[in-house]
Image (tube, grey):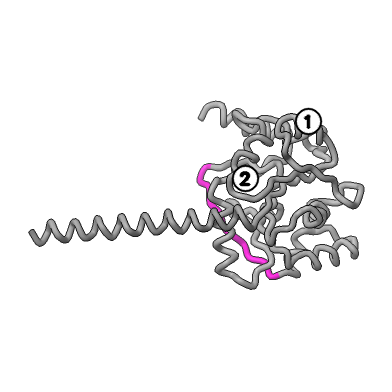
């Protein structure tokens, strides 16, 4: 009887813990849906991809644009694309999506796309996602949001995947805008150096067996798809 009661008590505690975790996740997801916009960064020249638009290529079984939108649209208020081309093609896939170009010409880097994005967002946070990200865990935004709430002074939280920092993959608070502007006014387009001047925190994400965190070249894209085809 004592053993049976003990077992029932343990099961009850585990069940309650699981329910609390689910409730916490649901509450955090509700917060991100209200407070966070998502911006897919696709403003590069893609020279290493021979000019191919990565966002319109298949990364595994799905076109990258559709895959990213599917993950982001249920976790954020709005999904936008920072890109200098192919806006009509994006809208043929997702009619409601908002597309914009950098407000400084010349493909100066992701920092300009981030700065421009704040002109289109009225939320407190923007979740920036590079168009060439190989894997985007569905729970990542929730984890970053929770991590930034824990570090209340943080202006930005960027992700390191398997010890490789991906500065373009980050959750940024509106408080970072002034530093973005200062950096660009100085014609310093280094995102790393910008983040060094902010209250930034890094979220370490380990994905065992993941060969590429993001796809930089045509060869990597081909290898990635070959691996995905046999999994």
Asked if 54 appears above or below 157 in the picture, the reply is above
x and y percentages locating residue 139 in the rendered image: 53, 50
Residue of label 2:
72
Percent across and percent down for residue 11 are 24, 55
Q: Nearer the viewer, residue 48 or 199?
A: 199
Few, some or many C-alpha atoms within 10 Å of disc 1 (few <14, some 14-19, many ≥20)?
few
- Choose top left, top right, bottom left or bottom right for residue 210: top right
Give yes or no for residue 226 being in the magenta stretch: no
Disc assigned to residue 33: none
Q: Is residue 228 left or right of residue 200?
A: left
Question: Element type at marker 2?
Answer: helix
The region drawn magenta spans: 199-209
> Which mark, residue 89?
1
Which residue is depicted at the point 59% across and 42% down?
Answer: 71
Q: Position of residue 182 (x, y in %)?
A: 85, 67
Q: Residues within 10 Å of mark 2 (few under 14, many from 20)?
A: many
């Amino acid at each position: 009887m004592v053993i049976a009661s003990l077992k029932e008590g343990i099961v009850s505690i585990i069940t309650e813990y699981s329910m609390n975790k689910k409730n916490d996740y649901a509450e955090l997801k509700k917060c991100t849906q209200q407070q966070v916009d998502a911006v897919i960064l696709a403003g590069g020249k893609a020279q290493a991809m021979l000019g191919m638009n990565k966002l319109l290529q298949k990364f595994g079984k799905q076109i990258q644009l559709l895959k990213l939108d599917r993950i982001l649209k249920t976790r954020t208020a709005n999904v936008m694309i920072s890109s200098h081309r192919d806006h009509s093609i994006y809208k043929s896939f997702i009619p409601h999506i908002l597309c914009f170009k950098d407000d400084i010409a010349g493909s100066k880097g992701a920092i300009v796309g981030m700065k421009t994005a704040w002109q289109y967002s009225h939320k407190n946070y923007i979740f920036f996602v590079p168009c060439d990200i190989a894997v985007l865990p569905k729970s990542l935004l929730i984890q970053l949001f929770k991590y930034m709430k824990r570090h209340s002074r943080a202006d930005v939280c960027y992700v390191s995947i398997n010890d490789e920092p991906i500065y373009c993959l980050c959750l940024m608070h509106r408080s970072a805008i002034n530093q973005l502007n200062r950096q660009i006014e100085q014609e310093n387009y280094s995102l790393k150096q910008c983040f060094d001047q902010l209250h930034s925190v890094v979220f370490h994400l380990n994905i065992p067996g993941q060969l590429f965190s993001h796809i930089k070249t045509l060869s990597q894209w081909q290898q990635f798809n070959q691996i995905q085809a046999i999994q």
